[in-house]
């Protein structure tokens, strides 16, 4: 069995693990310093940590498990990384530049079982969850890239919106958040971390009751059950009414606003009547949510969907504004590369499989 990534341990878990093996619990903070502040890539580089402690860690863990397969760089500064995992699977991670800092979008699963009919991420079914360490290492790989550039830049924001449904990998996502938030490590603030879900209502409630305190985004994409079920099969199991009840619970518990994500698909969900219906759905909840309209990035395998026209996006936005709904349009990144989440991965796997994704299981 291959050794797991040390990045998967929270500082608390690492301290307990060391203590069980006869070492001082406090040594975890020393190891943490070398991992996340000095950012070593080899245990042997931890020259100021107790040698027997370093030896013990190296016998049970590894630091690097991901290797860079492909890198695409956009004219706007966006970088999409295709990483190969230790078992050979491929995942995507994206670095985006904003005025407020550098944001990284991480992947949480190999493939996705949610089955949104417009999404590139679900072209290949989920084969497994990523470990907490594999998710943390995506951030570290991007930070290594920034360190190598020598400009003193650091990852300041994280969005958990890559391949997979984060709440279908809840425990590993929770540990990931605790690692990246730790003030002795990467120290990325809770308000700079956003987790996006397709709407697992029970997990939204569990998330509300946790101590994680990060931002929540919910992929809605339709204002009624009939349309949402057509484009998001998860709605059969968790209809809008149940999802909205969970969102209200989250607000009541945390007093934090939720982002409602809404991808605009030409002629499908982007008409003024859809905007009015969405406004009606959110009217009694306007204080707890902001709508983020997302221009669609077309996917070859989902040719039935096209990006909404600019005038349609503007009209949809205006309807919501007139109904006093807080709304924004997502700023696009990486439009000149494989912009859709999962698109680079699916193209590479299709290439490896001789041009077809059929019967491929990652």
Image (cartoon, rainbow, N blue to C red):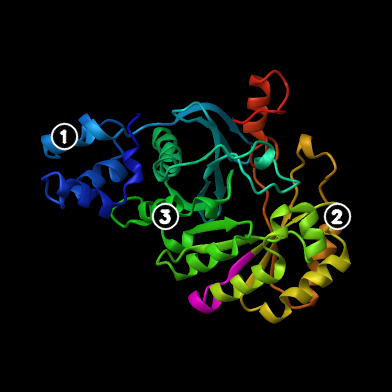
Q: Where in the figure is residue 124, as x and y percent of width and height?
A: 65, 36
Image quadrant where residue 39 sits: top left
Label whose residue precedes the other's in the sequence (3 or 2): 3
Q: Is residue 117 magenta?
A: no
Q: Which residue is mark 3?
A: 177
Q: Secondary structure at mark 1?
A: loop
Q: Can you tell which mark lies on residue 47?
A: 1
Which residue is found at the position 29% from the left and 41% from the top? 35
Q: Which residue is mark 2?
A: 268
Image quadrant where residue 77 sits: top right
Taking the image as shown, residue 285 lies to the left or right of residue 149, namely right
Q: Quote the CA–CA distance across marks 1 and 3.
A: 28 Å
Toward the viewer: 115 or 331? 115
Are the two marked residues, 1 and 2, in contact with CB atoms closer than 8 angstroms?
A: no
Q: Quote the CA–CA distance across marks 3 and 2.
A: 35 Å
Q: Where in the figure is residue 118, as x and y percent of width and height?
A: 75, 46
Label whose residue precedes the other's in the sequence (1 or 2): 1
Image quadrant where residue 71 sits: top right
Which residue is found at the position 69% from the left and 28% from the top? 359
Q: Which residues lie in the magenta part?
A: 251-259
Toward the viewer: 56 or 347? 56
Label whose residue precedes the other's in the sequence (1 or 3): 1
Q: Secondary structure at mark 3?
A: helix
Q: Is residue 255 magenta?
A: yes
Q: Is residue 357 above or below residue 6?
A: above
């Amino acid at each position: 069995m291959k050794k797991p990534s040390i990045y998967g341990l929270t500082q608390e878990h690492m301290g307990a693990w060391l203590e069980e093996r006869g070492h001082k619990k406090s040594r975890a903070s020393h190891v943490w310093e070398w991992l996340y502040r000095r950012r070593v890539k080899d245990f042997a580089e931890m020259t100021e940590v107790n040698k027997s402690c370093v030896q013990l860690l190296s016998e049970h863990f590894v630091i690097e498990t991901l290797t860079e397969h492909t890198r695409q760089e956009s004219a706007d500064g966006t970088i999409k990384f295709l990483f190969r995992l230790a078992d050979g699977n491929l995942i995507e991670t994206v670095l985006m530049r904003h005025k407020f800092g550098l944001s990284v979008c991480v992947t949480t699963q190999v493939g996705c079982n949610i089955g949104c009919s417009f999404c590139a991420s679900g072209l290949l079914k989920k084969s497994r969850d990523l470990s907490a360490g594999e998710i943390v290492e995506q951030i570290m790989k991007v930070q290594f890239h920034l360190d190598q550039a020598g400009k003193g830049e650091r990852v300041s924001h994280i969005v958990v919106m890559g391949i997979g449904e984060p709440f279908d990998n809840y425990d590993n996502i929770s540990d990931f958040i605790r690692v990246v938030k730790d003030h002795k490590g990467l120290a990325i603030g809770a308000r700079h971390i956003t987790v996006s879900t397709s709407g697992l209502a029970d997990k939204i409630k569990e998330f509300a009751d946790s101590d994680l305190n990060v931002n929540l985004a919910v992929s809605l994409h339709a204002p009624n059950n009939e349309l949402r079920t057509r484009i998001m099969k998860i709605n059969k199991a968790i209809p809008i009414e149940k999802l909205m009840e969970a969102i209200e619970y989250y607000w009541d518990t945390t007093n934090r606003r939720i982002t409602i994500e809404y991808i605009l698909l030409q002629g499908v969900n982007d008409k003024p009547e859809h905007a009015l219906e969405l406004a009606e759905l959110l009217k009694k909840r306007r204080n707890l949510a902001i709508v983020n309209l997302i221009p669609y990035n077309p996917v070859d395998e989902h040719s039935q969907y096209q990006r909404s026209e600019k005038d349609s996006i503007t009209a949809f936005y205006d309807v919501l504004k007139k109904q006093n709904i807080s709304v924004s349009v997502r700023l696009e990144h990486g439009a000149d590369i494989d912009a859709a989440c999962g698109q680079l991965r699916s193209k590479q796997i299709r290439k490896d499989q001789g041009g077809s994704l059929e019967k491929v299981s990652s």
